[in-house]
Image (cartoon, rainbow, N blue to C red):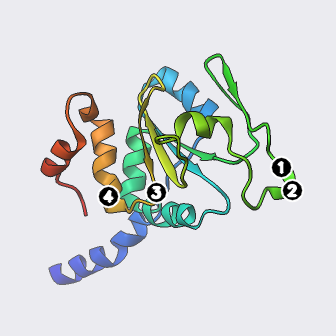
Amino acid sequence: MRQYLLFFAFLILPFFSAGQEVQWLKFEEAVQLNEKEPRPFLVDFYTVWCGPCRMMNKRTFGDPIIAQYINEKFYPIKFNAEGRDSVRLADQLFFNPDYDPKRSRSRNSTHQLTRAMASVNGRIAYPTVVYLNERMEIITPVQGYIQAAEMEPILHFIAEGAYADQEYQTFRTSFKGSF
């Protein structure tokens, strides 16, 4: 009987965990929630034409372990890096002055917020995940496609506040993840 119960548990367990998805927010929503309960922010800068962005959305952010941890520890924001939406943060308005509606499904101009947050050494790449502290100060942008197993230690490094007093490589060597 016990064997059947274990078999049944392993059979149905993936169905319960597979439903976990990242609960993406808009910037304004995340800022409001942060006023009541401060947390770090995770901002996914993506574009509509970016294949690695779609893969990361499906495979990395679609992983139930990653999605659950992000939902519990961060305010996750998905932001179209070449989109038309304006964003007001503190007293500054960010927008995309050269946005072309005719190119809404292809490469477009880069949003001001993307340039302000997602640039690394003057270079912008997609996808880029930017981690911010609860005061909306940039901790670090991470450019390029990252698998779930690679993202897990970064998430813990940020959420646990380890970035404040140790190097990532030091943290990484002692991290025991789920993958």
Residue 70 location (% of width, % of height)? 41, 46
Q: Of marks 3 and 1, which one's residue comes earlier in the chain?
A: 1
Q: Residue at x 32, y 58 (%)?
A: 150
Between the residue at mark 2 and the residue at mark 4, the CA separation in whole angstroms equals 37 Å
- Are there few (<14), some (14-19), or many (20+) residues within 10 Å of tag 4? few
Q: Is residue 51 above or below residue 74?
A: below
**Circles 3 and 1 in contact, beta carbons < 8 Å:** no
Residue 8 location (% of width, % of height)? 29, 79
Q: Is residue 10 above or below residue 154?
A: below
Between the residue at mark 2 and the residue at mark 1, the CA separation in whole angstroms equals 5 Å
Q: Which residue is mark 2?
A: 102
Q: Which residue is mark 3?
A: 144
Residue nearest the viewer, comparing 56 with 3: 56
Q: Which residue is mark 4?
A: 150
Residue 139 location (% of width, % of height)? 39, 33
Mark 2 belongs to which amino acid? Answer: Lys
Q: Describe the element under mark 3 as helix, strand or loop.
A: loop
Residue 164 location (% of width, % of height)? 26, 28
Quarter holding residue 92? top right
> With 17 as the anchor, is 46 left or right in this view?
right
Residue nearest the viewer, comparing 122 with 104: 122
Mark 1 belongs to which amino acid? Answer: Asp
Between the residue at mark 4 and the residue at mark 1, the CA separation in whole angstroms equals 35 Å
